[in-house]
Image: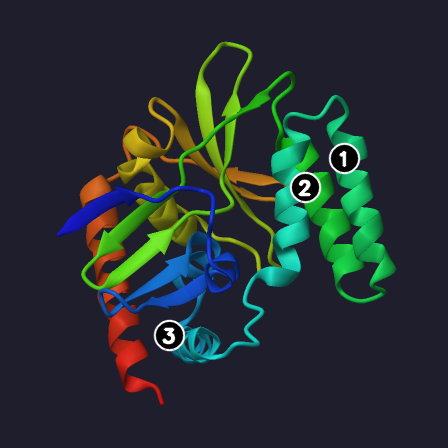
Amino acid sequence: MLVARVTPGKNASPSTARGMRVNSATGGVTIGGLPWLDYVLASPRRAARLAKEHKENYLSTESMAWFPYQPLLSGMRRAVNAVDPRAELDEVVAWGEMKQDWRAAAYRDSASGFLELLPRRATGVPVVRPVWSEGDLSVVFRSVVGLRLRDDSLMLVAPYVKKAELDRDAAEVVLFIMESVMDQALPGAVPVVWDTRRGKAFKLTKRTNRRNLEVAARGLAAKYLCEWSLVA
């Protein structure tokens, strides 16, 4: 059964902020929306490795998970309400370049793609952090960006900033999940996933078979929990 629930955006624990944790109260597993997108995009063998890595991250106090991307994702959320979005992201890119590692190119390409995809005169709007649950798995979307467009319509954006190119099949599974929690997250908004490194946007259409996506999403949740229980 699909369950949508909402958690507040504040007072997250350090492990939650890194994207993954075990819910000790329920025995379930909570994963961030972006690590979940990694899993959905992965091949079968890589998906199994990711489940193992995620479990190790859950159990480790040194877990980094998506943490290296958090300054970039936070900068994107600030940029949509900045007087000069480019200047806001330029500061984040400059910080990434100071690290003198992979972040220089990653931050630069992602910031450029984000600005290219950001609709003109769009403004940021508050978003309630949504959680999609299936069985003992909960997927929480912490890095989504709410936008109000010039025509007063709303958009909920999930920025994807990783090196691997995002494909439509993976994006649509995540879009279905976002759509299913939209009434709680940002009522009336259209869910969109942006592959910021390549400047590509994905969204569902009226002709998209939602039933097939529901089966895919629930099946992937069951598969993830099975792999979680099997890995050492």
Asked whether the beta carbons under mark 1 and mark 2 sit within 8 Å of each other, the answer is yes
- Residue 27's tag is none
Question: Whole-percent x and y of residue 145?
Answer: 52, 35
- What residue appears at the point 60 percent right and 58 percent down from the top-left corner? 162
**Of label 2 and label 3, which has the lower sequence position?**
3
- Judged from this view, the residue extending furthest toward the top is 151
Camera-side residue: 14 or 57?
Answer: 14
Which of label 3 and label 1 is nearer to you?
Answer: 1
Q: CA distance from mark 1 to mark 2?
A: 7 Å
Q: Is residue 184 above or below residue 129?
A: above
Question: Whole-percent x and y of residue 45?
Answer: 41, 79
Q: Residues within 10 Å of mark 3 (few under 14, many from 20)?
A: few
Going by the image, does 92 lie left or right of 130? Answer: right
Which of label 2 and label 3 is nearer to you?
Answer: 2
Q: Amino acid at mark 1?
A: Glu
Going by the image, does 85 lie left or right of 21? Answer: right
Assign the C terminus to one quadrant of the image.
bottom left
Q: Is residue 88 above or below residue 222?
A: above
State the SS at label 2: helix
> Where is mark 1, residue-wise?
88
**Of label 1 and label 2, which has the lower sequence position?**
2
- What residue appears at the point 52 percent right and 76 percent down from the top-left corner? 61
> Where is mark 2, residue-wise?
75
> Where is mark 3, residue-wise?
44
